[in-house]
Every structure is written in C-alpha cells, then in structure tokens.
C-alpha cells in the first residue's frame, strides 16, 4: 500500500474518518463494499472531512436491490463503524478531479492490465481513457472495455492529463521526441519501459516535465500485480499519491528509489516467469507420480496462489511458514532436502541477480543512446 493517505489530488489535509472492524470476514465484506475488492487490508482509511457529507442509505439500498452493480468511491457510499457498532453512511462528494483524463501510448499486456485495473477502481470512466497503437492488433480488447482508441500518439497526449508510455524500451526515445511538442505542465508522464531511466526520460522531454517511472508485472492483467514506482525531479508527493490511488486496484503498489526499479524487475517482473517454471516443475513431478496433467497443473497453480496469499496475509517470514509445514521425519522435509540438493535456493537468487543486471545493462544502453542523439 502507498504511504500517502491524501483524500483527493491536491488536498493536503489528512484525517482518520473511520476504522474497519478487526474481524477478518467482516472486514473483507466492508472492503468489498467500499472498493469492489478485498485486496485492500488497511485497518484505517484516511480521508479529509472537507470532501464528505452525511447522506441516507439510498446508495446501499440500490446496491442491495440490484439497481447498482456495485458501490465504489466515485458514486457510492462509505460505511463508518461507530464504537457502539452502529452503521452510518457517508457519501463522497468528490474523490478525484472530474477532468482527469488517462492516456496510453502502446497497447500491450502491461497497458491493458493497468487500464483494466484503473477502470475497475470505479473512479475513472472508460470515456476518460484513450489508447494509441500503430496497428489494430491489440486495440480490440480496449474497445471491448469501451475505451477510445486511435493511431495518433499526439491525439492521446492532447486529450490526457496522465500518459502511460507503454512501448518497448528502444521505442521510447522515438515516441518521446514525437510527443514532446504537445507536453505541457498539466501532464504527468508515466513510463513502464524496462531499463529507461528517469534521467533519460527527463532529457527527452521538455524541461520541468513531471515524470514517473513505473515497473508493473504481468499479473496486473488479473489485478494481482506488484508495482513499484519512483518519482522524477519535478514529480511531487501529490502526483505519486494520485498514481498510487489509480493503480491500487491493479494489486500491490509501492514507491521506492530508482535503484530499486531494476531489482523489482528481476524480482517481480521476471520473477513471474521463475514462478511459472517452478509451478510447471511441480505439476510435472505430480505427472511423473501418476496424476493427470491437467489436474496437476490446476493444483500447482492453486498451490502457488494459496501460498502467496498466506504469505501476504500472515506477514510471517517465508522461513517461518516453511517450518510450520514441516514435521519431523515427514514428507515435506524430505522434499525440501531434495530441493536443497538441487540448488533451488541458489538458482533462484542467481536468477534474480542475472535479471537485475540485465535491467541495469539496458539502462546503460539507454543512456548511451541518449548521449548519441
């Protein structure tokens, strides 16, 4: 979760309005009510009372009667648990700037996952999003979400406040040179290109441009991503807060220094593929022992999913959870011994290291290309 808890873009006020109940099942129901998702886990939600007013139960009634598909922060209501347990409803007057327009240059998996996540948050309408790509190949799935599409990058820039540059790293200089004439101080440029540094982005864009470097991963397409971003010289706290708020439906969102971005690429961007290899090996082991392949694959996938969820929710160190599975002389410790003999731990660490170094190498190449321009 992001460290900021500002209520709306540009508002500097902080206030703890209400607390979620501690009971896990009840808390998840409230999170579903508020966000349309149970991924958020904060016990406290922070909002500014200047943007809220008392209201009736109309929105809740519409939701329960089926007239409203779901409750969300833009048009819905937030429950507040009083100390005595009574429920009251506080309707949001304004959560985000109604003029906020989102643009995507590039229509690949990352762009699609982020766009889908932003829309699922309920604070941005499909009519406020536009995507550009040179061909129709990947635009169809955006159109299915009622997102406007175009072949003109300049059109996206001129109609957007926040622009996600989601093209291959070697295309970033070409794209940024093309759109630079249209960039103004109202724009925030968010790059998701691996290895392209903030220095490169800021040099290719007009002086003073607001730039953020973001590294998502593939599970963003199912709203279970891990995203890390870092702000450029002219990106302020409120720009980070707004981005964080937009991206929260995509999964875990964190901010860190730029040096962590390449590490995140090795850990989570490439790490997704490492997990797939491990899941594939688990399933193949089960097939070797006589289980049907399709069933083994489903169980392996659920095993990875469940283990990750437990690791997140328990907040325990992986070693502690591992020891809780092991019993003296049991099956797990024998299997772990085999993994250690195969060097799985060292191989995983080396894989993250190698992927991180490759990301850094791409960054150096990007810098070299910039100096030759």
Image: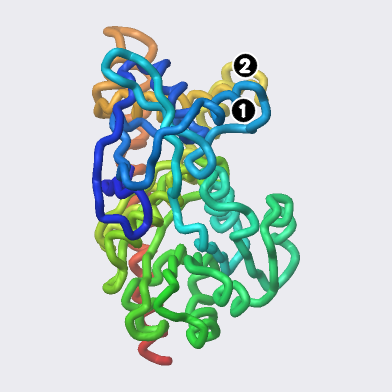
- Name the side, left or right, on which 145 lies relative to 210: right
- Name the side, left or right, on which 168 lies relative to 138: left
Residue wearing tag 2:
290
Find residue 299 and report its image quarter.
top right
Residue nearer the viewer, 56 or 181:
56
Q: CA distance from mark 1 to mark 2?
A: 52 Å
- Residue 143 x/y as whole percent: 72, 56
Above or below 328: residue 54 = below
Above or below 89: residue 175 = below
| Secondary structure at numbered mark 2 | loop
Above or below 86: residue 63 = below
Find residue 187 and report its image quarter.
bottom left
Q: Quadrant of the N terminus?
A: top left
Neighbour tally class for label 2: few under 14, some 14-19, many 20 plus, Cα within 10 Å: few
| Residue 99 seen by the camera | yes
Neighbour tally class for label 1: few under 14, some 14-19, many 20 plus, Cα within 10 Å: some
- Residue 167 x/y as whole percent: 54, 68
Residue wearing tag 1:
62
| Secondary structure at numbered mark 1 | helix
Colouring chosen for the image of the structure: rainbow
Q: Residue at x 64, y 69 (%)?
A: 132
| Residue 318 seen by the camera | no
Residue nearer the viewer, 273 or 142:
142
Residue nearer the viewer, 113 or 49:
49
Q: Residue at x 27, y 28 (%)?
A: 315
Above or below 339: residue 154 = below
Q: Quadrant of the C terminus?
A: bottom left
Q: Residue at x 29, y 46 (%)?
A: 5
Residue nearer the viewer, 217 or 254:
254
């Amino acid at each position: 979760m992001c460290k900021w808890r500002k209520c709306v873009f540009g508002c500097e006020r902080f206030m703890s309005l209400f607390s979620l109940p501690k009971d896990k099942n009840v808390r998840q129901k409230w999170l579903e009510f508020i966000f349309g998702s149970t991924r958020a886990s904060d016990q406290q939600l922070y909002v500014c009372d200047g943007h809220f007013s008392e209201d009736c139960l109309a929105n809740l009634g519409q939701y329960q009667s089926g007239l409203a598909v779901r409750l969300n922060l833009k048009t819905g209501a937030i429950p507040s648990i009083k100390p005595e347990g009574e429920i009251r409803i506080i309707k949001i007057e304004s959560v985000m700037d109604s003029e906020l327009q989102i643009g995507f240059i590039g229509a690949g998996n990352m762009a699609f996952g982020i766009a889908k996540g932003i829309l699922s948050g309920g604070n941005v309408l499909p009519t406020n999003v536009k995507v550009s790509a040179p061909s129709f190949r990947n635009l169809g799935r955006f159109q299915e979400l009622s997102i406007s599409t175009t072949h003109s990058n300049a059109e996206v820039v001129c109609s957007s406040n926040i622009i996600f540059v989601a093209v291959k790293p070697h295309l970033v200089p070409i794209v940024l040179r093309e759109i630079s004439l249209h960039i103004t101080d109202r724009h925030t440029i968010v790059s998701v290109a691996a290895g392209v540094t903030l220095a490169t982005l800021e040099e290719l864009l007009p002086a003073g441009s607001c730039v953020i470097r973001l590294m998502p991963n593939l599970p963003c397409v199912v709203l279970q991503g891990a995203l890390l971003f870092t702000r450029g010289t002219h990106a302020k706290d409120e720009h980070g807060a707004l981005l964080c708020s937009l991206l929260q439906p995509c999964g875990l969102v964190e901010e860190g220094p730029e040096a962590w971005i390449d590490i995140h690429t090795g850990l989570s961007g490439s790490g997704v593929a490492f997990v797939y290899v491990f899941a594939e090996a688990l399933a193949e082991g089960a097939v070797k022992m006589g289980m049907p392949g399709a069933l083994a694959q489903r169980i392996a996938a659920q095993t990875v999913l469940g283990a990750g969820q437990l690791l997140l929710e328990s907040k325990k160190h992986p070693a502690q959870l591992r020891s809780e599975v092991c019993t003296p002389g049991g099956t797990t410790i024998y299997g772990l011994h085999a993994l250690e003999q195969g060097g799985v731990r060292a191989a995983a660490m080396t894989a993250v290291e190698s992927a991180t170094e490759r990301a850094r190498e791409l960054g150096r190449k990007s810098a070299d290309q910039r100096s030759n321009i």
